[in-house]
Amino acid sequence: MGITNSIQIGPYEILYPLKPPVSPVQQYGQHHLPGRLFVVEGIDGSGKSTQLSLLHKWLETRGYGVVFSEWNSSPLVKDTTKLGKKKKLLTPATFSLIHATDFADRTEHSILPFLKAGAVVLCDRYIYTAFARDAARGMDPDWVRSVYGFAVKPTTAFYFRVPLETAIGRVTGARDGFKYYEAGLDLGLTGDAEDSFRLFQGRILEEYEKMIPEFGLTVIDATLPVEAQQAQVRQIVQCHLDSAKELRIRP
Amino acid sequence: MRQTYGKQLPGMRLSDLPGKLIVIEGTDGAGRSTQINLLKPWLEELGHAVLDTGMTRSRLAGEGIRRAKEGNHLGRVTQSLFYATDFIDRLEKEIVPALRAGFIVLTDRYIYSLIARAMVRGMDAHWIRSIYGVALKPDAVFYLRIGIDDLLPRVVFCHGFDYWESGLDLYPSQDFYEGFCNYQAALLEEFDRLAREYSFEIVDASADAGAVCEQLKRKILEIVEPAHAETPGVKMSETLVHSLADRILAKLTLGGPTSEPERSPAAEAPLTPEPVPVALAPQLQLRRQNRFSV
């Protein structure tokens, strides 16, 4: 059950392995905390948040104790991130570290204690978002993976795969303009926000594709109807809940 | 060409960094900031441009860390990464630009304090070192070493006990005094390990501030004015000063000649060049001023 190849940081028992584990059993092994951790990943406009909120409601109506944690939401760190973004103080390195700090706070306060308590924890974006964005900004991939060495390995990481143009079509209609870092304007690829967004998202998409085999991401075809995707997600989640009846807070 | 301890940050050119990076390290209350306040005007007097920087002074994360430390919500991993954010911001925005402009950077603590604090809080040794692998190797690290017994009176009679300096996040059941002793002892142990790993220059910080400063000045001159240390004129007067000092020492020491054998041949032929005596500092200063006025 245990993942022997994990490293130990601080008080945590089971952490993300830094190097690919030796055997497939270990690679697909679960952390031994009583809770379950499901995360959704994908580029902007992939529909991952919609899918996660449908899953959230489904789990709640079935009586599980569910906790939701969103990327970049730590109350302790958000003012610093906001300052950095507003004043354009962030470099690729500090962008990476402030998000890692945010993630660490959520791991220490929202994710790990709840997993220990046996909850189902849902994360909208996880370490793979950082790996993809930071690599797209030119950070060394090994360095970033090592920074996040304290992260808990998810039970399942869903990757909502969508062609770039489909995602951009969904996003551009829904919002007015792009933010500086969101569009990757800090990289100086091009002065136009929409062109920059397109180039940056393209780079991120490439990074995600590379991570599918590296981390065994569960790919969901995000061009399918919402209902069809949700049915797949629920089926996979269900398999991991069968052996965890004790998670139910109401029968 | 400068080096890092491991990886390189994107966009950070390591060539053309002519400045000097000098680190003052030590546990809380060792007198680091006192020394920096003495060294900075002295270096400026010699004609050097100086940048002084230190932990939690970054524009990006300094305020955030201060606010996070006011509450009781700052976890250990989060703390380590918040400090790393602060450090990298200063490295990219202050230290490297200053080194590129030829400044002497005096930094009040560097990655070593951050590693020591993380280690004492149970972080993984490999993890924390890999994060700071992107840091520049400095020109010198002066470790102001002070034992708990010498440190306690300074803390008690200067600013009193502090929650974080007493490690109460680590030892919540202890009082400030117990926490302080345990935490500082653990830090000291970690620092001694780091001193070997990173070859710190150890300076006894239990002496009075003036004496510590004279030691530091002598060592810093070797780094910032190596040309003068090598010029014949300085070398001659150096020998003169040394022979004078030997004579005076011989007269002062009881039974003068018997102390002679203590000077082993190794001590007389050191591997590293002898430091420029502090007594010569005014001369150097004059020379510099002349050079600038031409």
Image (cartoon, coloured by chain):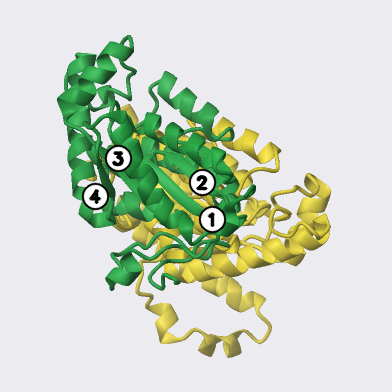
Chain colours: A green, B yellow
**Badge 1 element:** loop
Q: CA distance from mark 1 to mark 3?
A: 29 Å
Above or below, B223 relative to A188: below
Amino acid tagged 4: Met
Amino acid tagged 3: Asp
Compare residues A162 and B55 and report the one nearer the observer.
Answer: A162
Q: How many marks?
A: 4
Q: CA distance from mark 1 to mark 4?
A: 25 Å
- N-terminal of the pair, mark 1 or mark 4, is 1
Using the rendered image of the protein, determine whether residue B2 is visible from the camera's viewpoint.
no
Q: Label 2 belongs to which residue? A: A121
* Chain designation of label 3: A
Q: Residue at x 79, y 46 (%)?
A: B158
- N-terminal of the pair, mark 1 or mark 3, is 1
**Badge 2 element:** strand
* Chain designation of label 4: A
Q: Do the numbered discs 3 and 2 sit on residues whose CB atoms are within 8 Å?
A: no
* Chain designation of label 2: A
Which of the image's four quarters has the C terminus of chain B? Answer: top left
* Chain designation of label 1: A
Same subunit: marks 2 and 4: yes
Same subunit: marks 1 and 3: yes
Q: Residue at x 66, y 43 (%)?
A: B73
